[in-house]
Image (cartoon, grey):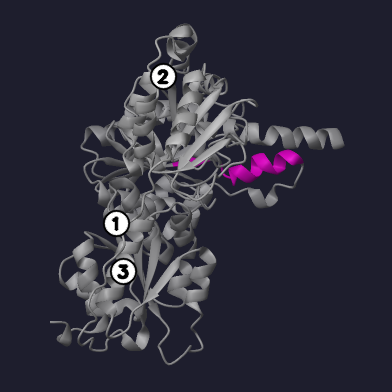
Amino acid sequence: MTEHLNVSDVVAEVCARHTEAVFGLMGNGNAFFTSNLTRRGLPYISARHEAGTVAMADAYHRASGKIAVATVTYGAGFTNSLTALTEAAKARTPMVVVVGEAPTTGLRPWDIDQLMVAQGLGVLTLTVAAGNAARVTEEAWSTARRERRPVVLSIPYDLSSEIAGPQEPATEQRSAHQTAPDPGVIQRIATMLVRAERPLILAGNGAVVSGAGAALVELGDKIGALFATSVRARNYLKTPWDLGIAGGFARTAPLHLMRTADVILVAGASLNAFQTRYGSLFAEDAEVIQIDELDAATNPRVTCFVQADATTMAQSLTAAVSPLDNGWRTRHPEVITASFSHDPPADEFAPDGRLNPRAVAQQLDALLPTQRTIVQDGGHFCGWIPMYCQAPDPQGLMMVGTAFQSIGLGIPAAAGAAVARPDRITVLISGDGGALMALADLDSAVRAIPSGVMIVFNDAAYGAEIHQYAARGLDDTAMQIKEVDFSAVGRAMGAQGVKMRSLADLQGLKEWLAAGAEGLFVLDVAISQSEVAEYMRESMAPILASETRAG
């Protein structure tokens, strides 16, 4: 009976009906809420830094499709979570973030206007009261699901332990409204696709959420198209005609083929700078059709935009096009076959004697179990694994931090992913800068990951800054990091691990895998600063050329 529950209990009762996991760090503002959940036995994973709570809940959803709760206290607890919360907002990750709030009587000296802060991040805040805690909490959950966004659910401090009393009745939540595609628009796009000599279908995370994979493949097969995906839709399209990741992480041969497409149908992909290879993914005269739930096109190269559900639109287009016997696939089979061939083995060492990250990534792909969840932090290194390592499905490869261009969320995200998918080995990929930033939650990872490998691409530097700014003549003093042995740090916190200076040093990882792969293994890989990822080299080339001419 809610008459005997306090406000925090009512919020917890509703949350417990909607989730299977809670990620938190307890403080004054969320103590009563957290106590209710832990007392009932709901799985509770404690972070060591508030940013970790939200990063864990974010990765939990990306790995499983389920929505989790993150919870922090008011004030400093809330502000500590903001980078991870912004990443979740920009990545459109649904979650409910239960936070403590200033009392209803007004701000205390240590309080801030949390509503204003959240608004600045583009995050909705809902605040509960004694008589509406159940209704408002239900609204937070329905909004997070329907709009695919994080929602902050705020409990004022003076109400957290107050008896809730009778609750307002729940209100009927509106469902997402989908507009049927206009028949004229369908016919126009169908004509463009049939006329195309080299049609390409590019699927993004929006297509995954919509469940549009089978419909897109059927459409592509009917017109002889090739396929590509964003990183978040990796291996989603079950077809042998998938060229792989488009944009910055594309392999060289498939990338050349993508650039020859004359009509590109984009379903649920944001077409951000990385997906479009800084504007170079599409031929200058290519027509780009974008289908998305958003209100407008997300890239100026789009020549035709349709606001629609990806599945509905793909099915309508399939019905409208005529089958083609002489499509792109059949006219140039030798070129297309070459695009699916594997890259040759990379050299083990760079000229400076440190490891070539390409060779390391190739070895890891062959060595690690195929049923894996790859969690990537942000940084220069993040191109190696998508290019050279396979993931079983879109949930098996997540890019944490790329939506907000942050680093330092990888370690707690790996813990969240492991909770979501304990049946898979968790593979965390980080740089040394990001790993140092998130070091507090290495303890969380050791506790929460039943079977995982933490791989640190350690170039003893902030690699992105080295390649973007030291290359342009800036002093690199602030870009360098005195080398840390993360395998030693991991062992001190309960993990196993080795420092890797040659490919032969993978023997320790092989033995750990053969022994059952239990717990966390930290592989600190001493890579070269001289090796530049293709996506970064290409993005910097025009800048360096311009500055060279100006000089």
Identify residue for label 1. 67
Q: Nearer the viewer, mark 2 or mark 1?
A: 2
Q: How far apart are marks 1 and 3 (CA)?
A: 14 Å
Q: What residue type is labelled 1?
A: Ile
Please tell me how crowded label 2 is: few (under 14), some (14-19), or many (20+) other residues with Cα within 10 Å. Answer: many
Q: Where is residue 187 in the image (x, y as percent from the top left)?
A: 45, 30
Q: What residue type is labelled 2?
A: Ile
Q: Earlier in the sequence, mark 2 or mark 1?
A: 1
Residue 80 shows in this picture: yes
Residue 181 position (above or below residue 189): below
Farthest residue in the bottom direction? 105
Q: Where is residue 181 in the image (x, y as percent from the top left)?
A: 41, 41
Q: Earlier in the sequence, mark 1 or mark 3?
A: 1
Asked if residue 30 lies left or right of residue 536, the reply is left
Identify residue for label 2. 223
Q: Where is residue 417 in the image (x, y as percent from the top left)?
A: 31, 49
| The disc label shown at residue 139, or none | 3
The one nearer the camera, 482 or 241, is 241
Q: Does the magenta stretch include residue 469?
A: yes
Element under disc 3: helix
The one nearer the camera, 361 or 298, is 298
The one nearer the camera, 379 or 432, is 379
Q: Quadrant of residue 364?
A: top left
Which stretch did the figure color magenta?
456-472
Element under disc 1: loop
Verify CB contact (< 8 Å) between mark 1 and mark 3: no
Residue 260 position (above or below residue 46): above
| The disc label shown at residue 156, or none | none
Give me the residue at 34% from left, 27% from top.
319
